Amino acid sequence: MLRIALPKGRLFGETVEFLKNRGIIQEGFEEGRKLQIQVGNYEFLLVKPFDVPVYVENGVADLGVVGYDVLLEREPDVYELFDLGIGFCRLVVAGKQEKYDYYRTSSCLRVATKYLRITKNFFLEKGIKAKVIHLNGSVELAPLLNLSDAIVDLVQTGRTLKENNLVIFEEISPSTARLICNRASYRNKKEQIFQLISKLE
C-alpha cells in the first residue's frame, strides 16, 4: 500500500485527470469533504498544497504531488522523483506599471507575498534590501493600496494581474507539479514506487 498526498485547490483537478489518464484512479474521484480515499493499492490524502511536503517529509505519506514553487519555499528533506509536466505556472515579481522604473533602480523595496523564503533569497542574490510583507491571499491588493512596491506571486494566465492593472516586472522561476518521496519509503517501498512511476511516465 502506498499513501500519496494530493494538493487540494488549483492543482487538484489537473492531478486527478493525470492519474485517471494513466489508470491509477477511476471516475468519481473528486475533491469533497472526504480527506482519505482508498483506490486499489493506493491511499490518497487530500491536503493543502503547502502541507504536502510536511506529510511526505514526516513519513505520514510515502509520496506527494506538489508544485515546484512549494518545494522552493519549503525546501523539504525529500526526494524529487518526477516532473509530472502539469500545473504550469510562473513565480513572478509584479507591480503597478508606474512603479517599474522604481523597482528597477531602487536598492530598497517593500514586497508582499506568501513566499517568504523565495522572496528573501531572490532579492538577497540581487543585492537589494527587501522588506518582505507576509500575506496569505489577495496579494494583488498590496501594491494597489500602497502597502508594497511589488508582489511575488504564482501566475498561471496573468488574468488576475491584468484585472488589477498590474504587470510582471520579472520572472523568478517556472513551476510544474512534481512527485516527491519520503526518504525511508524510497528505501523500503522502492519496488512499489517504481511500478507507480512506470505508469506515470
Image (cartoon, helix red, strand yellow):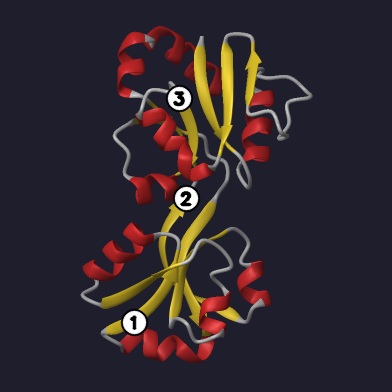
Answer with the quarter of the image where residue 158 lies.
bottom right
Q: Between residue 114 and residue 105, name the one nearer to us.
A: 114
In the image, what residue occupies the spot 25% across and 78% down?
129
Please state which amino acid type lies under the numbered disc 2. Answer: Ser
Q: Answer with mark 2 or mark 3, whichever residue precedes in sequence.
A: 3
Q: CA distance from mark 1 to mark 2?
A: 24 Å
Q: CA distance from mark 1 to mark 3?
A: 38 Å
CB of mark 2 within 8 Å of CB of mark 3? Answer: no
Asked if residue 201 shows in the view, the reply is no
Q: What element does badge 2 sit on?
A: strand
Q: CA distance from mark 2 to mark 3?
A: 19 Å
In the image, what residue occupies the spot 52% across and 29% down?
5
In the image, what residue occupies the spot 64% across and 15% down?
38
Q: Answer with mark 1 or mark 3, whichever residue precedes in sequence.
A: 3
Please state which amino acid type lies under the numbered disc 3. Answer: Leu
Residue 194: % across, % down: 43, 14
Residue at the disc numbered 2: 175
Q: What element does badge 1 sit on?
A: strand
CB of mark 1 within 8 Å of CB of mark 3? Answer: no
Please state which amino acid type lies under the numbered disc 1. Answer: Leu
Residue at the disc numbered 1: 109
Q: Answer with mark 1 or mark 2, whichever residue precedes in sequence.
A: 1
Residue 78 falls left or right of residue 159: left
Q: Residues within 10 Å of mark 2 (few under 14, many from 20)?
A: many
Label number found at residue 10: none
Residue 15: % across, % down: 62, 34
Residue 96: % across, % down: 53, 84
Residue at the disc numbered 3: 63
In the image, what residue occupies the spot 51% across and 61% down?
136
Q: In the rendered view, would you say 57 is above or below 116?
A: above
Residue 67 falls left or right of residue 11: left
Give the label, 2 or 3, closer to the camera. Answer: 3
